[in-house]
């Protein structure tokens, strides 16, 4: 399997623009997680899905952030409008029940 | 393992009646607890949550208190309305907490 696939790998955008991050989980995994990592705050869980249903989005920092999982093989994390403090590495991960999450390579987002 | 047990339905109440839907859980660690609601023809929506013992989640007149001593998270509403007709799901989450990381450098 190719592992968790994320795109783009790098994104540079201007404040106020909409940003969409994409993730393809490992086939057969029924959990999908979105994490954000910064030097200041470490690794934060933003939201996770089980069988395409959002289970907990309490980690989503603000209403500017939204995530969807329209099917078992695709998820998006959208930031609208983006702000400089959103600059971070965003990881998507997937897992089976009872297993640890497998992480994608991450998307490095820079908002200027 | 981790699991939740909800009272079996269906539940039928008159308008303005008091509602209680029981939920008990089994978990290792310190789970967060949730109630979700699914209206006819729609997907599940988060109704309320509590992240630690004695926390009370509340929304739209619904309340639930995280009771660690009884491992319960019962959903209550003082006066139900016709618009509350839906399917209610109790859920728990024990997810992956990460530390801040430790950088290791090995020198020859």
Image (cartoon, coloured by chain):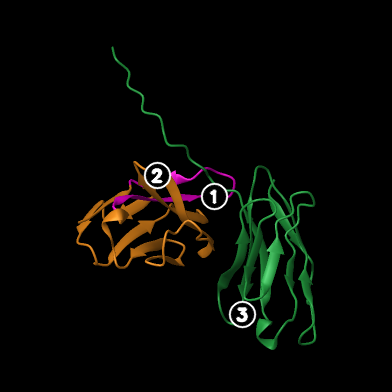
Instruction: Give the residues drawn in magenta, as a range.
Output: A87-105
Q: Quadrant of residue A61?
A: bottom left
Q: Quadrant of the C terminus of chain B?
A: top left
Chain letter for the residue marked with disc 3 in the picture:
B
What percent of the width, then of the height, locates residue B49?
61, 61
Q: Which residue of the protein is positioned furthest toward the top in this rendering?
A: B108
Kind of element beneath mark 1: loop
**Does the segment drawn in magenta span residue A27?**
no
Visible residue check, residue A94: yes
Kind of element beneath mark 2: loop
Label 2 packing within 10 angstroms: few (<14), some (14-19), many (20+) = few
From what the image shows, is residue A92 above or below residue B56?
above
Kind of element beneath mark 3: loop
Chain colored green: B
What percent of the width, then of the height, locates residue B46?
57, 68
Question: Gap between marks 2 and 3, in whole Å?
Answer: 37 Å
Question: Gap between marks 1 and 2, in whole Å?
Answer: 27 Å
From what the image shows, is residue B90 above or below residue A107?
below
Label ID, residue B39: 3
Q: Quadrant of the N terminus of chain B?
A: top right
- Are discs 1 and 2 less than 8 Å apart at CB? no
């Amino acid at each position: 399997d190719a592992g968790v696939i994320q795109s783009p790998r790098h994104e540079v955008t201007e404040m106020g623009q909409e940003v969409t991050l994409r993730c393809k989980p490992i086939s057969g995994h029924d959990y999908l997680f979105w994490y954000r990592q910064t030097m200041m705050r470490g690794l934060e869980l933003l939201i996770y899905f089980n069988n395409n249903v959002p289970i907990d989005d309490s980690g989503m920092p603000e209403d500017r952030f939204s995530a969807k999982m329209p099917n078992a093989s695709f998820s998006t994390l959208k930031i609208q409008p983006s702000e400089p403090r959103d600059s971070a590495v965003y990881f998507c991960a997937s897992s089976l029940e009872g297993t640890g999450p497998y992480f994608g390579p991450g998307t490095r987002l820079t908002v200027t | 393992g981790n699991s939740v047990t909800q009272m079996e339905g269906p539940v039928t109440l008159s308008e303005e009646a008091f509602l209680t839907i029981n939920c008990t859980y089994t978990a290792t660690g310190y789970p967060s607890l949730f109630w979700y609601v699914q209206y006819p023809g729609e997907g599940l929506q988060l109704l309320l949550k509590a992240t630690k013992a004695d926390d009370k989640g509340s929304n739209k007149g619904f309340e639930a208190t995280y009771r660690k001593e009884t491992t319960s998270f019962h959903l209550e509403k003082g006066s139900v309305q016709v618009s509350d007709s839906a399917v209610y799901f109790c859920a728990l989450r024990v997810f992956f907490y990460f530390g801040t990381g430790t950088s290791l450098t090995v020198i020859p």
